[in-house]
Image (cartoon, rainbow, N blue to C red):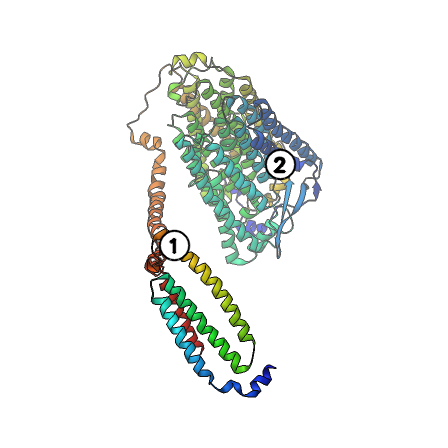
């Protein structure tokens, strides 16, 4: 069935590398956010962007090759990302209650 | 030369010497009780050493004395067994193969032949008496059990030394007695001086032990895979190998003999390694009697007698042995003239008397050496135990200037001490007279066959004999004669103990009569010890070490030695047997030199110990502190510390910094992977 979709020629309306370029841009934006922002909430959001960039790559290749494995991976990533966001936000909240801010550069109790 | 008639052509003698390489070898017979002679003291040492602290004093005594007494009984049974066998035969306990490598095959086995039979009876017999004496002398010591454990361990080692079938088993005993000597000299180890005396003895002995090991290793190369004393291979075959391989063989033989002699100078306290023995008097007095007079210190003489085929084949080594023995005898005897510590006098006397034995070995008179070893064991053990009885009675007073007049207080000690003095001084018909006389005669007679240095050794022997008579009676009269010069309170309480007088009486009896086993050859076939030892030493009579028994010289030697003995005794009596202490010429140069023992300790300290200390402290500073501690131990630690200190900045706790590193690292890795 997958092969018939691929053979129908619908896959080639937009070339693969366009998807990949968008994904790279998204991933770079996300990385920059993770690396550069002080606020833990912003960092978590940037992580989501990076995950979505990866999802986009999965889907692009799934579409290219007509293979459902990419879709499966994407669902997993979305589920894990939801869980990660829930735990991450809970942690951020806990840290905020404790320290009255969520600045990552001040969370260095384990240094040296 | 009036001895010219006995002079044999040396060439013929040398030719004969190559024909015969050692005593004839008889058959070996199994011995049922021989291993018990050795094992019993070991069991005693083990029981007292491990459980002694919990045993009562009488249990410790029973185990300690009983094991040695039983060993003596078993030894006696085996010697009687030996005497029923043909002369050349001997008894063995085959034991097991200890190690073998290629041709070399060493078994842990024991042997009893005529030579070791004399030794084993002397050691276990005198040992038993000294154990009995110790029960009285040491009874108030806290470490009574430890003392008996050490003493039994010593007996075990000594018996191993005597009964070892080969050089390796002998060496185990040789080291064992050295260890026990160290343990017992430093028995009262809380006194620093005594602990140091133990160390001094151990270190001086180590030098000799090293020589023993080197000599034994050398011998392995020439002995066809066996180091047995009595076998077709072993020591005798090494001699055959070496004497038949020309100049280099002769010089190797000479070196091996000399190394065994160095070993003997360590154990038997001869020049130059004698210095430990006088200090060894720090140990309990029965120990001095057992180890440092009767048994262990004669081990060197025993080893040289054991190795007689080796020594007989190297006349140069024999001459050195004779001269060193004579020198030691005279040298130590002169030091003993002025010593004021009762045990120090006896210690130097021991060094001097062993010098006589070594002199006897050096002139090929092995029977005389063993004879003197035996009589010396009796009279010197008696003298030491007598001094122990005096020291015990006077609450550890050892200075003879504060003694005197003990005749009435210690009657049995007095009489036994006196007969032993007569024996050691060579007064006619006491034991020392016969043995010393035989050695002096042989030293003089050996000159006749072309060994002129032996004459010097003999002359030194006479000087030593004269000094011996004088200093022994000086000691006797200062201790027992005249009037008491110490604390009167101590004098009133002085008494003898029965456990201590019994051994004295037995030893005094032996010191008096033991000489009759060696009646001089002027009465033919009367020398019982010579006959008994003939399987070991009679072969020498067919080599160059044969001296015709010239009755004229023998009687002349006897008269001269008796005269100097009696003369020395009377001189000492005239000077010292009076109420007040004679004033010693302490300012005279000779007296100062003798009191300071010829400054030999100081010389050794300057020549050996000081450079050693300097080298050691240099090595400590450079190798130990700088290289090992500084570079190898602290170096890596410092390096890692430095690197860690610089690197710790990376772990700053900032999550984003870590992520940056991860991203950059991952990007770099991907870049290279692509």
| Figure quadrant of residue B635 | bottom left
Residue B282: image x %, image y %?
Answer: 43, 30
Q: Can you say which quadrant of the picture contains the C terminus of chain B?
A: bottom left
Residue annotated with mark 1: A95
Closest to the observer: B660 or B631?
A: B660
- Above or below, B549 against B168 in this view is above
Q: Local crowd at mark 1 within 10 Å, few (<14), some, or many (≥20)? A: some
| Figure quadrant of residue B327 | top left
Closest to the observer: B581 or B134?
A: B134
- Above or below, B56 against B353 in this view is above
- Above or below, B350 against B241 in this view is above
Res. A3 visible in picture: yes
Report in which chain the residue with disc 2 lies.
B
Residue drawn at the location 33% of the way across and 33% of the way down: B593
Closest to the observer: B119 or B477?
A: B119
Q: Is B37 on the left or on the right of A71, as rendered?
A: right
| Figure quadrant of residue A40 | bottom left
Q: Are marks 2 and 1 in contact (CB under 8 Å)?
A: no
Residue B44: image x %, image y %?
Answer: 60, 31
Residue drawn at the location 47% of the way across and 13% of the way down: B409
Q: Local crowd at mark 2 within 10 Å, few (<14), some, or many (≥20)? A: many
Res. B546 visible in picture: no
| Count of numbered labels shown in the rendering | 2
Residue B272: image x %, image y %?
Answer: 42, 41
Disc 2 secondary structure class: helix
Residue annotated with mark 2: B38
Q: Is B140 on the left or on the right of B536, as rendered?
A: left
Q: Is B103 on the left or on the right of A82, as rendered?
A: right
Q: Is B427 on the left or on the right of B584, as rendered?
A: right
The span from disc 2 to disc 1 (Cα, nearest Å) is 83 Å
């Amino acid at each position: 069935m997958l092969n018939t979709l691929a053979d129908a020629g619908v896959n080639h309306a937009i070339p693969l590398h366009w998807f990949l370029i968008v994904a790279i841009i998204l991933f770079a934006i996300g990385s920059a956010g993770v690396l550069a922002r002080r606020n833990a909430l912003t960092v978590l959001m940037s992580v989501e962007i990076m995950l979505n960039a990866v999802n986009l790559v999965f889907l692009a290749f799934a579409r290219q090759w007509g293979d459902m494995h990419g879709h499966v991976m994407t669902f997993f990533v979305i589920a894990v990302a939801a869980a990660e966001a829930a735990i991450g936000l809970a942690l951020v909240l806990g840290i905020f209650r404790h320290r009255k801010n969520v600045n990552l550069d001040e969370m260095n109790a384990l240094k040296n | 030369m009036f001895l010219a008639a006995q002079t044999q052509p040396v060439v013929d003698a040398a030719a004969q010497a190559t024909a015969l390489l050692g005593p004839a070898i008889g058959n070996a017979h199994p011995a049922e009780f021989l291993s018990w002679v050795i094992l019993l003291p070991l069991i005693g040492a083990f029981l007292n050493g491990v459980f002694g602290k919990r045993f009562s004093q009488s249990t410790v005594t029973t185990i300690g004395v009983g094991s040695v007494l039983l060993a003596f009984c078993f030894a006696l049974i085996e010697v009687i067994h030996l005497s029923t066998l043909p002369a050349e035969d001997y008894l063995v306990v085959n034991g097991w193969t200890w190690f073998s490598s290629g041709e070399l095959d060493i078994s842990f086995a024991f042997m009893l032949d005529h030579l070791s039979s004399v030794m084993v009876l002397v050691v276990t017999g005198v040992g038993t008496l000294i154990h009995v004496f110790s029960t009285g002398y040491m009874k108030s010591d806290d470490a009574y059990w430890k003392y008996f454990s050490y003493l039994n361990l010593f007996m075990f080692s000594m018996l191993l030394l005597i009964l070892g079938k080969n050089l390796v088993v002998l060496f185990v005993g040789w080291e064992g007695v050295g260890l026990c000597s160290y343990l017992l000299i430093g028995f009262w180890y809380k006194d620093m001086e005594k602990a140091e005396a133990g160390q001094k003895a151990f270190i001086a002995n180590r030098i000799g032990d090293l020589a023993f090991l080197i000599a034994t290793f050398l011998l392995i190369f020439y002995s066809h895979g066996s180091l047995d004393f009595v076998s077709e291979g072993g020591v005798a075959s090494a001699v055959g190998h070496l004497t038949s391989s020309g100049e280099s063989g002769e010089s190797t033989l000479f070196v091996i003999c000399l190394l065994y002699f160095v070993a003997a100078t360590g154990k038997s306290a001869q020049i130059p390694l004698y210095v430990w023995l006088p200090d060894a008097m720090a140990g309990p007095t029965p120990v001095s009697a057992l180890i440092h007079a009767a048994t262990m210190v004669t081990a060197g003489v025993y080893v040289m007698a054991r190795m007689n085929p080796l020594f007989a084949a190297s006349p140069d080594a024999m001459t050195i042995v004779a001269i060193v023995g004579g020198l030691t005898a005279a040298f130590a005897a002169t030091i003993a003239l002025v010593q004021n510590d009762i045990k120090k006098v006896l210690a130097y006397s021991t060094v001097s008397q062993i010098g006589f034995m070594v002199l006897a070995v050096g002139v090929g008179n092995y029977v005389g050496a063993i004879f003197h070893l035996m009589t010396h064991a009796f009279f010197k053990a008696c003298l030491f135990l007598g001094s122990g009885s005096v020291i015990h009675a006077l609450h550890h007073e050892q200075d003879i200037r504060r003694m005197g007049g003990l005749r009435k207080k210690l009657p049995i000690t007095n009489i036994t001490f006196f007969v032993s003095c007569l024996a050691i001084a060579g007064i006619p018909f006491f034991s020392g007279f016969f043995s010393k006389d035989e050695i002096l005669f042989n030293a003089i007679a050996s000159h006749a066959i072309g060994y002129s240095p032996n004459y010097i050794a003999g002359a030194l022997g006479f000087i030593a004999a004269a000094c011996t008579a004088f200093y022994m009676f000086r000691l006797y009269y200062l201790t027992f004669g005249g009037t008491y010069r110490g604390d009167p309170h101590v004098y009133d309480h002085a008494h003898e103990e029965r456990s201590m007088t019994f051994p004295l009486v037995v030893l005094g009896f032996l010191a008096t009569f033991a000489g009759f086993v060696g009646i001089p050859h002027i009465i033919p076939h009367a020398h019982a010890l010579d006959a008994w030892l003939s399987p070991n030493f009679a072969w020498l009579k067919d080599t160059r070490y044969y001296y015709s028994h010239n009755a004229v010289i023998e009687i002349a030697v006897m008269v001269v030695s008796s005269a100097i003995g009696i003369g020395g005794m009377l001189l000492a009596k005239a000077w010292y047997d009076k109420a007040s202490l004679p004033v010693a010429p302490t300012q005279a140069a000779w007296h100062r030199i003798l009191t300071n023992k010829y400054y030999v300790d100081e010389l050794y300290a300057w020549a050996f110990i000081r450079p050693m200390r300097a080298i050691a402290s240099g090595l400590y500073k450079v190798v130990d502190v700088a290289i090992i501690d500084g570079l190898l131990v602290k170096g890596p630690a410092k390096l890692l510390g430095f690197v860690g200190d610089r690197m710790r900045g990376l772990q700053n706790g900032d999550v984003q910094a870590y992520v940056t590193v991860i991203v950059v690292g991952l990007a770099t890795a991907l870049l290279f992977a692509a």
